[in-house]
Image: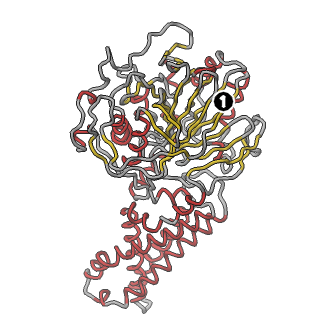
Amino acid sequence: MSDDHAPLDGSDHPERTGGHTNGEPAGERAARRPRTTDPLELGFTPRKPVPWLAPFLLISTGIRTLLAMLFGAYLDKRELQNSLDARVARQVGADGGLWLDYVADLGDGFNATYSVAYLLAQPELTVDGHRLPRAQTLVMGGDQVYPSAAYAEYENRCKGPYQAALPVTPPERPTLFAVPGNHDWYDGLTAFLRLFVRSRDRHFGGWDTGQSRSYFAVELPADWWLLGVDDQSGSYLDDPQLAYFDEVARRLGPESKIILAAPAPTWVKAAEHPTAYDSIDYFIRTIISPTGAKVRLLLSGDLHHYARYAGADRQLITCGGGGAYLYPTHKLPERIEVPPRDTLARRASRTRPYDLVARYPDAARSRRYGWGIFPRLPLRNPGFTTLLGTLHTLLMLAMAGVAANRAGGTEQRLFSVPLAAMLLVTVLGAALFAKPPSATGRRHARNWILGVGHGLAHVGLAAAGTWAWLSLPFYDWPWPLPVVAAAVLYGPVSGLVASQLVAAYLLVAGSLGVNVNELFAGQGIEDSKAFLRLRVDPDGTLTIYPVAVDRVARDWQVNPDQSPTASWLTPKTPLTPRLAEPPITLR
């Protein structure tokens, strides 16, 4: 495969070696294959799915999000990237065409992440009768790691699984390009730049890394172009980035066709956040459109499912099924207008309608997944259940103190103060949960109604629990035995019951468009994953194969095939990929 990288000024630049010389494997790990699935043998620790409703994780994620919002401009390293090489890559296969993979939202639990990585790394897939050879180019579309951008998390949740999937660079030398998502930005892009933007050891498992900044431009066969932008979690496009793409635009013409990879599907989010699409619209309107080139395809992850909106001459595809928890498809709008008519931008492109023509999983299956919240919430988030049990135990003790002291004396007033505080914390916490502080969408009355109603339901549950507890002999025991009994007996039971109340709330609220993300994040569904395999033919035909995996593998074994490029681990039960919809053809 031709893999040329040329500076924007047109000067010569030697072809990359990708970290290997004279055919020797790239990277130290490739020299020794693991004999077992022990982390010491693998060189990384396979992780379980992130328990998104774990109390400490909720707090730390909220703090990180808040810090990113408050200090993102101070941590923004994009201006500094102006000192790095400004190169444009060229990717062309031996037959004059190219196979290209797109995967996003991948660095979560090992089973889901590695199932997708394993399929990406195989020499060939047969999917619904289509023979799909391994792609020569891999694009990671954002959120390569969860929950934070710590370097150790990148190793264990992203780089390690992909190293195990493709340990050594194969003869066709596949190249990797990555778009940073909001989770990649939580450390100001430090770990992302260390992994994907390097001047030496430019490999990521068996893939060579092909970009010199957090954004990139790749020339593909037949005047197709792949452009990956970095909008710093939806804020803006920096001046060095715009200058870079201004130079790229000099190579575009009326016959050029663009694939634009963005960090988030702002075309969908604009229905709730009218300004969400402004940066992408500005980029297309000021950089691409003046050249006469056409943006034929927009790609994004961020929402963890597959969805395609079709317009007159453009396809908008969300494919965030690389490993993170499943996000529902049954609440997607059937038609969107892009850009939205109510954008605040002073100038915007002409609004065009786009219809939802495909989604995976389908709406019916997505709704059925929602009902899984009842068993999965306590199982996936034991810390959250413990927090609920603690809250209800304190609430019960406060109520019991008031109920057991009928005389209106000082002792009752002392018990009444914590009860008032607990009631306030319960109702206010539930109201804020209905509209998380980090959310920036429009506030609706239903958010507050549902939130306050949810809080009052917990108060009612606590009152019922108090009545049941006072009917038992424990409360009359000498102090501190009642508190011990409450912690040992009442806490676990009330936590489990309260988790089912939260599950019922999430199911009802989700049907009304509130806490939809929490309804599915709380379940941590590993199945229903997806990625795209694209083929650019020498004649300019682009074919998109949306590959879906209904069930990821749970059990792994050391691969008996000891050839250098073979995956280290194979599933005990073979994966059975299929197409989420028939292939899409663009010309």
Residue 229, visible in the rendered structure: yes
Q: For mark 1, what is the residue?
A: 283
Q: What residue is at 61 percent from the left and 22 percent from the top?
A: 245
**Image color mode:** secondary structure
Q: Give the side of residue 455 with respect to residue 332, left or right.
A: left
Decide: is 584 above or below 390: above
Which residue is at 48% across, 23% downward? 211
**Percent coordinates x, y for residue 455 in the rendering:** 53, 71
Q: Amino acid at mark 1?
A: Phe
- Front in this rendered view, residue 346 or 18: 18
Crowding at label 1, few (<14), some or many (≥20) Cα neighbours within 10 Å? some
Give x and y (percent) for residue 466. Answer: 41, 84
The answer to whether residue 66 shows anywhere in this view is no
- Quadrant where the image shows the C terminus: top right
| Residue 419 drawn at (x, y percent) | 45, 77
SS of the residue under disc 1: helix
- Asked if residue 177 is positioned above or below residue 340 in the image, the reply reads above
Q: Nearer the viewer, residue 23 or 236?
A: 23
Q: Residue furthest front?
A: 129
Q: Please count the marks in the image.
A: 1
Reply above or below: 350 against 379: above
Residue at 62% across, 20% down: 222
Q: Residue at x 63, y 48 (%)?
A: 358
Image quadrant assignment for residue 282: top right
Quarter of image, res 36:
top left
Q: Is residue 217 above or below residue 349?
A: above
Q: Position of residue 292 (x, y in %)?
A: 73, 22
From this viewpoint, which residue is outermost toward the top?
Answer: 12
